[in-house]
Image (tube, rainbow, N blue to C red):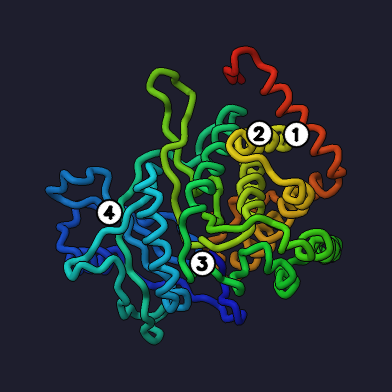
Amino acid sequence: MDQTDSTGETVEKPSLTEEEARRLIEERYGFKVKSLRPMNSYIDLNFHVKVEDDVSWPYGYTLKVTNGTFSRNRDVFEAQTQMTTFLEHKGFPVPQAVPNLRGEVMSLESLRGNDNGPCSENMVRLSTYLPGSILYDVPMTLSLAYDSGVFLAKVQEALQDFFHPALRRPDNLWSLAGLPSLVKYLHCLKDERIKDEIRKIVHTFGEKVLSRMDELPQGAVHGDFNDQNVLVEEEPTHPGKYRICGLLDFDLIIFNPYVFDLAVGLMYLMSAVRDPNDPITFGGHFLAGFESVRALTPVEWDVLYYCVVARALQSYVFGHHTASIYPENREYLMVTAGGLWKLIDRWWGTPKEEIYKQWRDIQKSLRNQSNGSLEF
C-alpha cells in the first residue's frame, strides 16, 4: 500500500488501541474475542483475532482497518472481495470476507485521529486468517522459487475470467505505468549519485516499456506478489521442504499488463534470496516455473528486464519515503527497501542479454531432466 494518494496527499495511519479493536469486533461482528495481537502493516492497521466457541474457522480472523484516505475507495474494496471470492471458488487459498451482524462485508467507522486529532472515516473489514509462514521467513530454495512462479502464473490464468471496473486505476502509484511520478519522491534520498541513476532508469523505462503498452497482454492481476504476501507450509513427508499454501493482501489489485505482475514477483523473489551472489539464478527458476504454465510473448520478453528494475525502484524509493514519515515503523517498512540498491546496481549493471541467456539455460536444463521430474 502506498503512503500517498494520487494527488500526493500524505496518508495518516489509523489510530486504534487493542482494547478499541476488541470492542469493535464484539459490537460489529458479535464475536467474543479470546485473543488479539497487532500484525505488521504498511499504513493500515491489522490484527490477528481469535474468538471463543468458533469451530467453523479455528485459525482466527484478520481485522483490517484501512487509513482514512484510501477508505474513500469503496469500489476498490468491493473489487477485492469479489476477486478473493472468485479465486476461492477456483480452488486458490485466499482470505475470505466475513460479514458483520448487518450482513455487510465492510463498514465505515468513525475513529479518533492520532494525537487526539479529528476523527476520520475508516473502512473496517474482517477476513479469515490463513495459517502458514510467510515466504520471507523460510529459506529460499530453487524448487520453492520454481513453485512460486507456477503459482503466480496459475493465478494470472484464473483471473483472465475476472473483471471489475474499479480495477482500472490509472492513478495508482504502485503500478509500473506510473513510474515517471517516482521522481517527485527523490527528495527523501541523500545520495545524489543514486538519484541521478534513478532518473536515468525512469527515462529508459519510458522509452522501452511505456511506449509499447498497447502491445502487452493485459488483465486483472494481484499486483503485489511478494515474500510478505505468499504463505508456505512445511510438507509433512519432507521436513525442510515447503509448499505454497496461501496468497494475501489484495490491496493493489489492478487491470495491468501481465508482465508487470510477473516483474513484481520476480523482483521480490530475488530480493528475498539470502545468498547475495545468486539472486538472478533464483529468478531464473521462478521464471521457468511461470513459463511452464504460460510462455511470454516476444514483446513481454523484450520489456521484462526493464519492468523488474522499475519495481525495484518503486520499492526502494517509496520504502525510504514512507519510513521518513513513519520512523516508528521503519524496521518493517525497510524490510525490502533497506538492502535493495545492491540488487538494483547489480541488475542494471548486467546486460539484459547476459541475464536472459542465463535464464534460457536454466529452462533448457530443467526441460532436459529425465522423465520430467524436477529435482533441485
Which one is closest to the eye, mark 2 or mark 4? 2
Compute the Cα span from label 2 to label 1. 8 Å
Determine whether label 2 and label 1 are within 8 Å by CB.
yes
Reading the image, the residue beneath label 3 is: 167
Dot 3 crowding, Cα within 10 Å, few <14, some 14–19, many 20+: some
- Dot 4 falls on a residue whose secondary structure is strand
Reading the image, the residue beneath label 2 is: 288
Q: Position of residue 72 (x, y in %)?
A: 43, 79
Compute the Cα span from label 2 to label 4. 38 Å
Q: Nearer the viewer, residue 326 or 197?
A: 197
Under mark 4, the amino acid is Val
Compute the Cα span from label 2 to label 3. 28 Å
Compute the Cα span from label 4 to label 1. 43 Å
- Residue at 59% over, 29% down: 141
- Residue at 62% over, 69% down: 173
Determine whether label 2 and label 3 are within 8 Å by CB.
no
- Dot 3 falls on a residue whose secondary structure is helix
Q: Position of residue 376 (x, y in %)?
A: 61, 20
* Dot 2 or dot 3, earlier in sequence: 3
Reading the image, the residue beneath label 1 is: 359
Under mark 1, the amino acid is Trp
Q: Which mark is residue 49?
A: 4
Dot 2 crowding, Cα within 10 Å, few <14, some 14–19, many 20+: many
Q: Is residue 65 above or below residue 237?
A: below
